Image (cartoon, grey):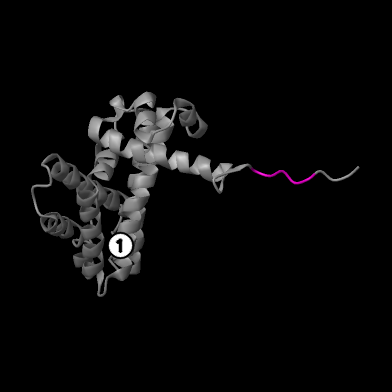
Amino acid sequence: MPESAPQRRRSYRGQSSDARRAERRQLLLEAALNLIAEQGYSNATVRNLCAAAGLTERYFYESFSNREALLGELYQQQTEILREAMLSAIHRSNGGAEQAVRAGLQAFFETLQNCPSLARVILFEIFGVSKTMDALYYQAMEDFAALLGELAQVLGIARIVPPASDAMLYAGLVGAAVQMARRWVLNDYHESPDILVESSLLLFMALSEQQDAPLSVEH
């Protein structure tokens, strides 16, 4: 039996069908970022999203099963942008623990200020949608806490003496920075980013100050 010819994907104006599908998907994500940030997730209907993206509704379901699936991917996309900005700043920093932590915090708060749509989605709009979205949020916070833990190890910041928990402490530090960020955004970025950085740094550098005298819990 003769071999069948390899299946070719149709192209349009030099683009394959896969490339055009990926482009439409990205258009929907970009439209969702702006629409959700400006009007809230509850107002980001499929019709509104497609209108903002310049697509018909059938193309929405080509990429996403429902609005929540789009929100989940958008949230993960934006948190990765934030994480990469922080990692890049940390890697570029010169010096010890304080300089590295300051660089990471500076990138965190400046990214939120420079990208208010990102800030709105990851700090506010993800909440209260569903248990699935709540789980995405908490996983992202765990990932940031793990990143902080890795940074602490690389920089030689002291470990915490049991029964206190490293993981709990890192989660608390991340939570504190996020709460500062939420307050800052709700206050329309009134304070300078430097105020947020230095305020957070006081908490983060409390770890390094325990290098010679580890924190312990007395009974």
Q: Measuring 27% from the left and 52% from the top, which residue is drawn there?
A: 169
Pinpoint residue 37: horizontal percent, then vertical percent.
26, 36
Is residue 90 in view? yes
Asked if residue 55 is among those painted magenta in the image, a careful observer would answer no
| 88 relative to 173, above or below | below
* Residue furthest left in the image: 190
Asked if residue 7 is among those painted magenta in the image, a careful observer would answer yes
Q: Is the residue marked by circle 1 packed among few (<14), some (14-19), or many (20+) residues within 10 Å?
A: some
Is residue 219 in view? no
Which residue occupies the foreground of this view, 149 or 127?
127
| 21 relative to 208, above or below | above
- What element does badge 1 sit on? loop
* Residue furthest bottom in the image: 95
Q: Which amino acid type corresponds to the residue marked 1 in the rendered image?
A: Arg
Which residue occupies the foreground of this view, 209 or 16?
16
* Residue furthest right in the image: 1
Q: Measuring 35% from the left and 68% from the top, which residue is drawn there?
A: 154
Q: Name the residue under label 1.
A: 159
Pinpoint residue 59: horizontal percent, then vertical percent.
48, 31
Pinpoint residue 10: horizontal percent, then vertical percent.
63, 42
Q: Is residue 111 found left or right of 186 in the rendered image?
A: right
| 17 relative to 82, above or below | above
- Predominant secondary structure in magenta? loop
Number of labels in the image equals: 1
Which residue occupies the foreground of this view, 210 or 95?
95
Part of the protein shown in magenta: 5-9
Q: Is residue 104 found left or right of 8 in the rendered image?
A: left
Q: Measuring 22% from the left and 51% from the top, which residue is drawn there?
A: 114
Q: Is residue 2 found left or right of 36 in the rendered image?
A: right
Q: In which quarter of the image is the N terminus?
A: top right
